[in-house]
Amino acid sequence: MEKMKIKMLYADIKSDIEVIENELEQALNSSSHLLNDASVHLLQAGGKRIRPVFTLLSAKFGDYNIDRMKNIAVPLELIHMGSLVHDDVIDNSDMRRGRETVKAQWNNRVAMYTGNFIFARALQYVTSIENPRAHQILAKTMVELVNGEVIQIEDKFRLDQSLKDYFRRIKRKTALLIESSCELGAVVSGADEKTARHLKRYGYFVGMSFQIVDDILDFTATDKQLGKPAGSDLMNGNVTLPILLMKDDPQLAPYLTKVAVAGLTEEERQNMLALVRNSEAIKEATHISNLYLKKALKEIEALPKHPMKKKLRDIALFMGKRKS
Amino acid sequence: MEKMKIKMLYADIKSDIEVIENELEQALNSSSHLLNDASVHLLQAGGKRIRPVFTLLSAKFGDYNIDRMKNIAVPLELIHMGSLVHDDVIDNSDMRRGRETVKAQWNNRVAMYTGNFIFARALQYVTSIENPRAHQILAKTMVELVNGEVIQIEDKFRLDQSLKDYFRRIKRKTALLIESSCELGAVVSGADEKTARHLKRYGYFVGMSFQIVDDILDFTATDKQLGKPAGSDLMNGNVTLPILLMKDDPQLAPYLTKVAVAGLTEEERQNMLALVRNSEAIKEATHISNLYLKKALKEIEALPKHPMKKKLRDIALFMGKRKS
């Protein structure tokens, strides 16, 4: 992530993002040393806080009040953080964003409960929101999110899956939480129905584009940029868009067979990466991501005139065009 | 569990418990085959549904309506079920109630997400409850529950822990959810403050007594009665009341040392069990459990005259005196 660039994008809500950051710190406080250590570790790892940003920007279309909005922005980020901690267990990941994961620094069990603790804290924040619809949206999002994680297990190493399977999976894994971040910003701030609907759809399309870019970067970025080995997705059995678009390539076939049964050697990983990077699949996947991005921008056009429209546009473009 | 006896205790709310059972089945329905299989597995394993029973009986002190009460009774049981699935991961348990656990039949990852899915479903039920206090109680309970699970990891194989550490742990692990089941029954049904407070305290004391009995039975019951090897707690590093009360026994010392470093052989397990079963510690632990039971019964006395008081008394006695 180009940190400078993203800071500029956040400039309007800088002090409010700091409020969120402080709240996150407080939220992760517990009477257990182990949980505190794991939480500090997570907070220091940082993150783009993109979900709170979407919530706050969306809330600007309604009656904006940071003290109210933090009670929905914080749990959205917590749910994201908790699911990352659990994902590292399932993906057996030792590194994330260039740091050791909770499961690597401690173990799977600590990671499981750290995730649970973060989810429970998220829940605690939400209790102070009186809007029943907000609760329903959030609860449904959590159910679908977890459902998506299980589907990800079911689809692991499955090369017979369709593009539809892939889109269904990334919708649940990523797009839904970003969609809800936007929708909840609108709903909790009392923005009108039509605005809330467009913001929700904007979030969905941005989320889809964002995840596809993520899945492309997993092949095209360097180990250093990713903070973990490039090609990790495939090596963990997560069959993503670039692979689905070139799975019949006879040159790739031996790697796809071997990755599922014995894993790849370092040399094989490099060869596989070179193959994917030079394939048409990367261009095609980028094209598909851009289609989602365009749909997102179209939703912004449909929103009422507002200074934040440009911000939403800039962030979508930034997320959809990023190089790392 | 003496199944006949417990059925008699539930007689008054039999049809309502069936409503809960059906709702649980529906709640665990998902679009993932894996989740459905794991859920059916869990439902078939059954359980005493003791938390919903406490909720429904407590609700009888207010304006009882099963359609409203199920929205709190179901999530309470779901939270319990989800935490059991996660506990089996942490305890590395292959058997529970005489059946293979989710983590044994599938694996730790499936168990983790099955637990998450169940928690998320619980949350979805709660959204239909409009009482903000109910949300707060439930969220706080979940935070403390998970906190307790982490403390359980921290305290594993620690023989230098105090009785206070143990009581703090079982409070969070067990008593709190039973306390909340009673309190939420009262709060959601609109029972008066004083009644809610006594029911809450009743639940806490019953929960403490229940867990101590559970920890005693882990040593004194047979493998068959337990549906898993007797002594599992100690073998998993969970230092419970009987052990804390006899940890300075020179005869027990070699087993305590060995269990932490290499585990016990079958012969050593049998010898350890014989030692604990014949110790004063079992009597002392039973005495402490009975003290909690008495406190629970005292809370019932303080409740307003009501036909359900006898039921609460019978269930407390049943739970506190059970032999398996």
Image (cartoon, coloured by chain):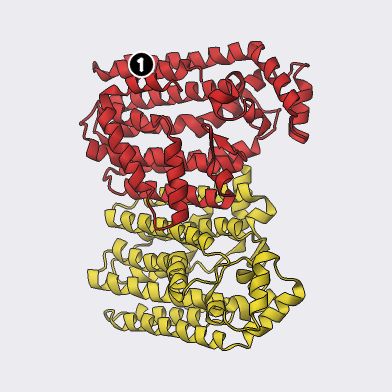
Chain colours: A red, B yellow
Q: Position of residue A242 (x, y in %)?
A: 63, 19
In the figure, is residue A135 to the left or right of B42? left
Residue at image position (36%, 78%) is B308
The residue at which mark 1 appears reads as A313
Residue at image position (42%, 69%) is B168
In the figure, is residue A176 to the left or right of A96? left
Q: How many marks?
A: 1
Question: Regarding mark 1 in the picture, which secondary structure is present there?
Answer: helix
Q: Is residue B156 above or below residue A126?
A: below
Q: Is residue A46 above or below residue A314?
A: below
Q: Position of residue A153 (x, y in %)?
A: 63, 39
Q: Position of residue B177 (x, y in %)?
A: 42, 64
Q: Position of residue B272 (x, y in %)?
A: 68, 79
Along the viewing direction, whichever of A188 and A315 lies nearer the viewer = A315
Along the viewing direction, whichever of B118 and B20 lies nearer the viewer = B118
Residue at image position (31%, 61%) is B188
Residue at image position (24%, 33%) is A190
Residue type at mark 1: give it: Arg
Q: Chain of mark 1?
A: A
Q: Is residue B74 visible?
A: no
In the figure, is residue A4 to the left or right of B323? left
Q: Is residue B81 visible?
A: yes
Where is residue A131, by image quadrant? top left
Image quarter hosting the N terminus of chain B: bottom right
